[in-house]
């Protein structure tokens, strides 16, 4: 297996067919097919299923795709880092953000990188918290903001701050919109829950179990827009952090109660791969990301109890 084979395989995977990939690569289709056939023979697995509409990856093809993306990105990062000499940082930097943070951070991060690092291509990938962790642990991401990252292998992690979790539901229009609720009272509220792998759900369920509290789940959903729709219709309650809630707070539809006795909190960490050197581009984007985080914590858009967020020694 070599880098050219991985590049050809990645092109077929992304383009969904050999014809489109051969045009993109400017490589004759028979030669492209030969490289993929050789790769399949070497690995002893089928990577693509041929269909009338093109090709679809097999389960082995999907797994190889994850590795190919990480390897090709590392090669490109190394090329950009070395060939850049002493000039400004260059290359692509992938940042994985959980949905709870993307709304707050994406725009200012893109704006500053575009202005201050013109030779750096920033790529932000957002997803559920466990998806951000998967992107980082697989080596595909360069930087990741990951909740409760201590147990994720292959990553360096700096715990930046703690954040509180809130019970959120439709506002009745008269009561105070912000308050507190003891953990032991949560069973009285039917919860709209996300996927069981989501870090926030795991954190609150583990805390409840430790306190002998049995939560009531009325619905399990996968989409953020679905959750907001149900909350605003009064179909249940959800547990979320303020960074996620804040994007809709000014609509005056939802109310929030901080969970207390004990407080429900989670730790937000900045992560990067252990097994590869950090390029100048990644280091420069990391500095900007930390500064953007400091801004949103300082002005209250992301209420937090700082740990290492203001410490420059690790940067």
Image: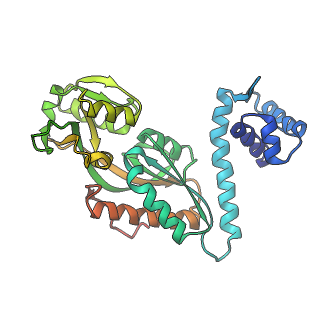
Task: Specify whether 109 is left or right of 311.
Answer: right
Residue 70 in sight from this viewpoint? yes
Colour setting = rainbow
What residue is drawn where x is 41% and y is 41%?
Answer: 129
On-image quarter of the N terminus = top right
What residue is drawn where x is 29% and y is 41%?
Answer: 240
Q: Nearer the viewer, residue 164 or 244?
A: 244
Looking at the picture, how far across and down is residue 143, in whole percent?
Answer: 50, 55
On-image quarter of the C terminus = bottom left
What residue is drawn where x is 39% and y is 70%?
Answer: 313
Residue farthest to the bottom? 86
Label tally: 0
Q: Nearer the viewer, residue 180 or 145?
A: 180
Task: Specify whether 246 is left or right of 97.
Answer: left
Looking at the picture, how far across and down is residue 241, in whole percent?
Answer: 29, 45
Q: Nearer the viewer, residue 223 or 216?
A: 223
Asked where in the image residue 202 lies, by quadrant, the reply is top left
Asked where in the image residue 196 lies, by quadrant, the reply is top left
Residue 309 in sight from this viewpoint? no
Q: Nearer the viewer, residue 182 or 236?
A: 236
Looking at the picture, how far across and down is residue 25, in whole percent?
Answer: 81, 47
What residue is drawn where x is 35% and y is 51%?
Answer: 268
Looking at the picture, how far across and down is residue 127, in whole percent?
Answer: 46, 42
Q: Is residue 303 above or below residue 256?
A: below
Q: Is residue 19 above or below residue 285?
A: above
Task: Specify whether 163 is left or right of 279.
Answer: left
Asked where in the image residue 236 lies, by quadrant, the reply is top left
């Amino acid at each position: 297996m070599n880098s050219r084979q991985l590049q050809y395989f990645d092109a077929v995977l992304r383009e969904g067919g050999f014809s489109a990939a051969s045009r993109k690569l400017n490589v004759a289709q028979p030669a492209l097919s030969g490289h993929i056939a050789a790769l399949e023979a070497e690995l002893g697995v089928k990577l693509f299923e041929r269909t009338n509409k093109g090709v679809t990856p097999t389960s082995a093809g999907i797994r190889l795709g994850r590795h190919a993306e990480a390897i090709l990105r590392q090669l490109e990062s190394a090329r950009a880092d070395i060939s850049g000499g002493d000039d400004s940082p260059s290359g692509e930097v992938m940042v994985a953000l959980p949905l709870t943070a993307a709304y707050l951070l994406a725009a200012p991060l893109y704006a500053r990188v575009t202005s201050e690092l013109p030779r750096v291509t920033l790529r932000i990938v957002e997803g559920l918290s466990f998806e951000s962790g998967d992107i980082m642990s697989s080596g595909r991401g360069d930087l990741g903001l990951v909740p409760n990252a201590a147990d994720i292998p292959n990553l360096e992690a700096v715990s930046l701050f703690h954040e509180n979790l809130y019970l959120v539901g439709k506002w009745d229009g008269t009561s105070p919109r912000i308050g507190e609720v003891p953990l032991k009272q949560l069973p009285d509220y039917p919860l709209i829950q996300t996927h069981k792998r989501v870090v926030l759900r795991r954190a609150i369920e583990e805390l409840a179990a430790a306190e002998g509290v049995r939560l009531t789940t009325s619905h399990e959903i996968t989409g953020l827009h679905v959750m907001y729709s149900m909350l605003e219709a009064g179909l249940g309650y959800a547990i979320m952090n303020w960074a996620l809630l804040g994007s809709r707070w000014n609509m005056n539809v939802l109310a929030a109660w901080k969970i207390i006795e004990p407080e429900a909190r989670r730790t937000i960490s900045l992560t990067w791969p252990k097994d590869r050197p950090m390029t100048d581009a990644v280091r420069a984007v990391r500095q900007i990301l930390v500064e953007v985080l400091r801004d949103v914590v300082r002005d209250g858009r992301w209420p937090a109890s700082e740990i290492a967020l203001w410490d420059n020694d690790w940067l």
